[in-house]
Image: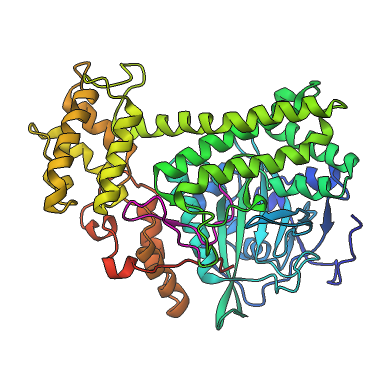
């Protein structure tokens, strides 16, 4: 791929990286020439810092004071570049809702460079919403404030829940309007990721049969994410196995909190196993495996229950891209990757059961079933079936199990109140089975309740609360609801006085027909 000339002036002001505490490296730009287009951001005309992630800045070793000052704002808004930055728009392809697009790429994003954080981990720093690039395909390359703040909230919520995720370093209002269905305030997100390598990155070069670039990309990804495999004869197969394991773990954790990504295209699936591209994502209220929120997912391809299936489908596309690297014996290579793909459902089920055991306070080191010999998996399935049959809130049902652990008769009024009268008898019968299993080794009830509260969040980014916060910021310029919700989501397991409303699902009429949009 030949890089087009950037029509914008190359002489953007430069700010001392040392002043900001940055020590940018540019390994993607320098080691993978031809896999990107060097490009400059479009400077924000009247930038205003809306949110700055001090915790993340500390992890990256940045100077938070300088970052919050005039020079920092200039860099975060694209008005200036760090002195050692070599910004590039990354190339990738992707299957979008099952249809292959041979060229997508960073249509509104730029990779500024990488920084080695305080723990020695290499992490990307990138813009999202920084203007048109060679991959914009007619789009304006901009982002609106609402979707930028949504991604900020979602990333921090997932981080606090312990789920691998990209994160926002900053959200900056650009001071201009972007045209969507109507004019909206523009914004720019500064995103941090272990890398922005996607399944679609490999598809880009595999579809072009560019073996040399595909090899360089794969070796770069291995050196960055699976360095123990570097130089090994079977490294590409083992790399594929490692990616599959990371995805099985990630999807298991998504399912455990009722998270629905909404647009699991192959260009939105990272090699690192981090959640990326929070577009039409949402968290489920009432448990229903068929839940779909995305306005563009007309057939439910990316419904909650389909996410493990789609992860496997995406891995098959990665396997197809990597096959040319796996030696001359194509039949053997196909058999090897097929074995990994066929093993994925079992990998996912193992990860999912591990997540659910923790949510139910069950120890895998004890008996695998209760006194009646019913397996843990069946115990989980029966609980979820009760939630679905009676439209019970997913998050609160798990959270209130702690109350049941502390009540001698196991009835737990808070949990029972989630069920209509006709469902309570069945729920009580399940509770007795569960308590028998959870306390079979003599575990104290108080210890069980404590473990349950540590495993099951009370606060999640409920859709109606997110919408309230984004509407206030967008329509009234009021960030207080966003900041209050963000603060709460950073400690999702800790109950706070006066915050009962933030733990409750939306009213039924609010939930009905709720839709999310890609937005940015």
Q: Please say whether residue 274 is visible from this viewpoint.
A: no
Q: Quadrant of the C terminus?
A: bottom right
Q: Residue at x 36, y 61 (%)?
A: 484
Q: Is residue 492 left or right of residue 413?
A: right
The answer to if 283 sits in the magenta stretch is yes
Counting from the top left corner in percent of width and height, residue 86 is at: 80, 54
Q: Residue at x 90, y 40 (%)?
A: 212
Outermost residue toward the front in this view = 331
Judge whether 302 appears above or below 436 on screen. Answer: below
Q: Please say whether residue 142 is visible from this viewpoint.
A: yes
Outermost residue toward the bottom in this view = 182
Task: Give 78 or 235, whichever is nearer the viewer.
Answer: 235
For the stretch drawn in magenta, the main secondary structure is loop
Q: Quadrant of the N terminus?
A: bottom right
Judge whether 48 appears above or below 497 on screen. Answer: below
Q: Quadrant of residue 434?
A: top left
Magenta residue span: 275-294
């Amino acid at each position: 791929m030949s890089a087009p000339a950037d029509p914008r002036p190359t002489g953007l002001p430069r700010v001392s990286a040392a002043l900001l505490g940055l020590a940018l490296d540019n390994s993607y730009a320098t080691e993978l020439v031809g896999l990107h287009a060097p490009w400059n951001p479009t400077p924000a005309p009247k930038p205003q810092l809306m949110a700055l992630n001090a915790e993340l800045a500390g992890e990256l070793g940045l100077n938070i004071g300088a970052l919050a000052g005039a020079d920092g704002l200039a860099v975060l808004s694209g008005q200036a570049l760090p002195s050692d930055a070599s910004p590039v728009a990354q190339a990738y392809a992707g299957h979008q809702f099952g249809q292959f697009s041979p060229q997508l790429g960073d249509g509104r994003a730029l990779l500024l460079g990488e920084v080695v954080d305080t723990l020695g981990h290499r992490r990307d720093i990138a813009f999202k919403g920084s203007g048109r690039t060679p991959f914009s395909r007619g789009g304006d390359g901009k982002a609106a404030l609402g979707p930028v703040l949504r991604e900020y909230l979602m990333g921090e919520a997932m981080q606090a829940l312990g789920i691998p995720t990209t994160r926002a370093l900053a959200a900056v209002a650009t001071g201009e309007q972007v045209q969507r269905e109507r004019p909206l305030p523009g914004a720019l997100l500064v995103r941090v990721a272990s890398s922005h390598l996607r399944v679609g990155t490999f598809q880009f070069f595999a579809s072009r049969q560019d073996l040399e670039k595909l090899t360089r990309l794969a070796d770069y990804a291995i050196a960055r994410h699976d360095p123990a495999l570097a130089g090994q004869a079977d490294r590409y197969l083992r790399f594929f196995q490692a990616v599959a394991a990371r995805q099985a773990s990630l999807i298991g954790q998504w399912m455990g909190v009722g998270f629905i990504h909404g647009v699991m295209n192959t260009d939105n699936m990272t090699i690192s196993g981090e959640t990326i591209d929070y577009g039409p994502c949402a968290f489920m209220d009432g448990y229903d495996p068929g839940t779909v929120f995305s306005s563009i997912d007309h057939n439910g391809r990316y419904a909650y229950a389909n996410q493990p299936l789609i992860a496997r489908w995406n891995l098959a596309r990665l396997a197809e891209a990597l096959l040319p690297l796996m030696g001359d014996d194509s039949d053997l290579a196909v058999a090897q990757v097929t074995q990994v793909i066929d093993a994925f459902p079992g990998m996912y089920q193992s990860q999912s059961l591990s997540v659910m055991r923790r949510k139910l306070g069950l120890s895998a080191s004890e008996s695998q079933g209760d006194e009646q010999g019913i397996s843990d998996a069946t115990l989980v399935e029966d609980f979820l079936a009760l939630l679905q049959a009676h439209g019970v809130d997913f998050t609160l049902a798990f959270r209130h199990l702690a109350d049941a652990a502390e009540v001698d008769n196991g009835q737990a009024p808070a949990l029972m109140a989630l069920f209509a009268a006709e469902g309570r008898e069945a729920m009580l019968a399940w509770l007795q089975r569960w308590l028998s299993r959870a306390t079979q080794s003599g575990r104290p009830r108080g210890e069980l309740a404590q473990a349950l509260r540590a495993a099951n969040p009370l606060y999640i980014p409920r859709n109606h609360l997110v919408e309230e916060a984004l509407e206030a910021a967008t329509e009234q310029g009021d960030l207080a609801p966003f900041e209050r919700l963000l603060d709460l989501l950073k400690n999702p397991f800790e109950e706070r006085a006066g915050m009962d409303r933030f733990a409750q699902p939306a009213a039924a009429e609010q939930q009905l027909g709720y839709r999310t949009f890609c937005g940015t």
